[in-house]
Image (tube, rainbow, N blue to C red):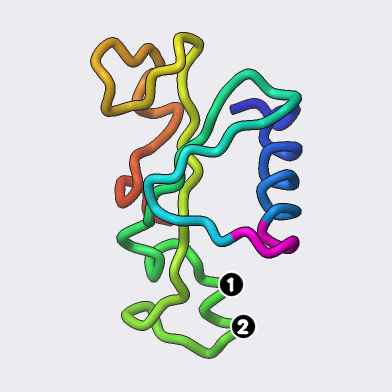
Amino acid sequence: MSPHDAGPVINTVAERVRAGHVLTVGEVVTFDDWTHRVTVEEVPNPGEILFSANGHYGLPPFASVPAFQLTYDDLEGRFPWDEGYSRPSWLQPRPGGFRA
C-alpha cells in the first residue's frame, strides 16, 4: 500500500477506535473516501515484531501485547484468501509471515 493511502487508512481506523469502536477479527472495514476495504486479522507472532511496544510495557516476547493486521483487498475487491487475488504475496505479508 502506498504511504499516500496507508496514513489516512490507519488514521481513520484509529479515530474510530478512539471514538469507542472495538475492532474484531474478521470485521470488514469500509471507508467513505477510499474505494478499498480492509479486514481485521490477528497477528499470531506479535512478540517477534512489537519490540518497542513490549519494551514500553516491560513485556517479554512470549507475553507480548496483542496486534491486529489490517489486510486490504485488491482492485477487484478480493482478499488474499479469495481465488484470483491479484497482488503478489510479498506486497502484503500474511499475519505470522513477517518477522523483524
Horizontally, residue 14 falls left or right of residue 64, namely right
> Residue at point 56% right, 82% down?
55
Identify the element where label 1 is drawn: helix
Q: Give 80 or 51, whichever is nearer the viewer.
A: 80
> Residue at point 45% right, 16% down?
77
| Range drawn in magenta | 17-21
> Residue at point 28% right, 21% down?
82
Horizontally, residue 75 falls left or right of residue 4, namely left
- Read off the residue under disc 2: 56
Image coordinates for residue 100, horizontal then vertical, percent: 43, 56
Q: Give 42 or 88, whichever is nearer the viewer.
A: 42
Q: Residue furthest front?
A: 20
Above or below residue 40? Residue 4 is above
Q: CA distance from mark 2 to mark 1?
A: 6 Å
Image coordinates for residue 45, horizontal then vertical, percent: 33, 62
Identified by mark 2, the residue type is: His
Q: Are marks 2 and 1 in contact (CB under 8 Å)?
A: yes
Q: Residue furthest bottom?
A: 58
> Residue at point 45% right, 47% down?
40
Image coordinates for residue 87, horizontal then vertical, percent: 41, 17
Above or below residue 32? Residue 87 is above
Q: Main secondary structure of the magenta part?
A: loop
Label 1 Cα crowd, 10 Å radius (few <14 / some 14-19 / many 20+)? few
Count every numbered label the image shows and give the total.
2
Image coordinates for residue 16, horizontal then vertical, percent: 70, 53
Identified by mark 1, the residue type is: Ser
In the rendered image, residue 45 lying in the magenta stretch gets the answer no
Label 2 Cα crowd, 10 Å radius (few <14 / some 14-19 / many 20+)? few
- Read off the residue under disc 1: 52
Q: Quadrant of the N terminus?
A: top right
